[in-house]
Image: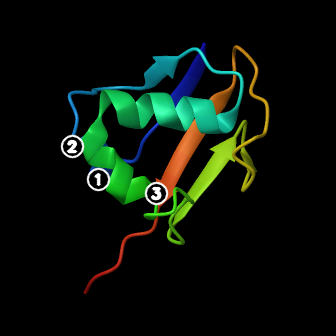
Amino acid sequence: MAKLILPKQLMQDTTLTDEFVCPALTLGQALESLVQSYPMLKTQIFNNDSTVRNFVNIFVNDEMIDDLTMPVQENSRIQIIAAVAGG
């Protein structure tokens, strides 16, 4: 099962207290599973055209990945990093 780790600012909109675990063959499938379980995250992670928002970076096993078709392994660690702005 792939493990998705979310930043605190995204996790506060969910019932998650740790990581989200799901079966997935690709990075895109893992993210889709996440937003199906927590629909409020969709607009925070994705643009209207289903591309990842500019201020969101996704790492698979500590490597930044832009390609949602990238295969993920059963023990992959997927980390979502969202930039925070403000003063």
Q: Are marks 3 and 1 in contact (CB under 8 Å)?
A: no
Q: Are marks 2 and 1 in contact (CB under 8 Å)?
A: yes
**Quadrant in which the C terminus appears:** bottom left
Residue depicted at 54% across the width and 72% down the height? 54
Image: 61 above or below 84: above
Q: Secondary structure at mark 3?
A: loop
Three-letter residue code for mark 1 = Gln
State which quadrant residue 14 falls in.
top left
Three-letter residue code for mark 3 = Phe
According to the picture, the residue beneath numbered tag 1 turns out to be 9
| Disc 3 versus disc 1: nearer the observer | 3
- Residues 19 and 41: in front is 41
Q: CA distance from mark 3 to mark 1?
A: 15 Å
Q: Secondary structure at mark 1?
A: helix
**Quadrant in which the N terminus appears:** top right
Q: CA distance from mark 2 to mark 3?
A: 18 Å
Image colouring: rainbow
- Residues 24 and 76: in front is 24
Which percent across, then down, holds residue 42? 36, 49
> Of marks 3 and 1, which one's residue comes earlier in the chain?
1
Which percent across, then down, holds residue 52? 55, 59
- Label drawn at residue 12: 2
Residue depicted at 66% across the width and 36% down the height? 27
According to the picture, the residue beneath numbered tag 3 turns out to be 46
Image: 85 above or below 33: below
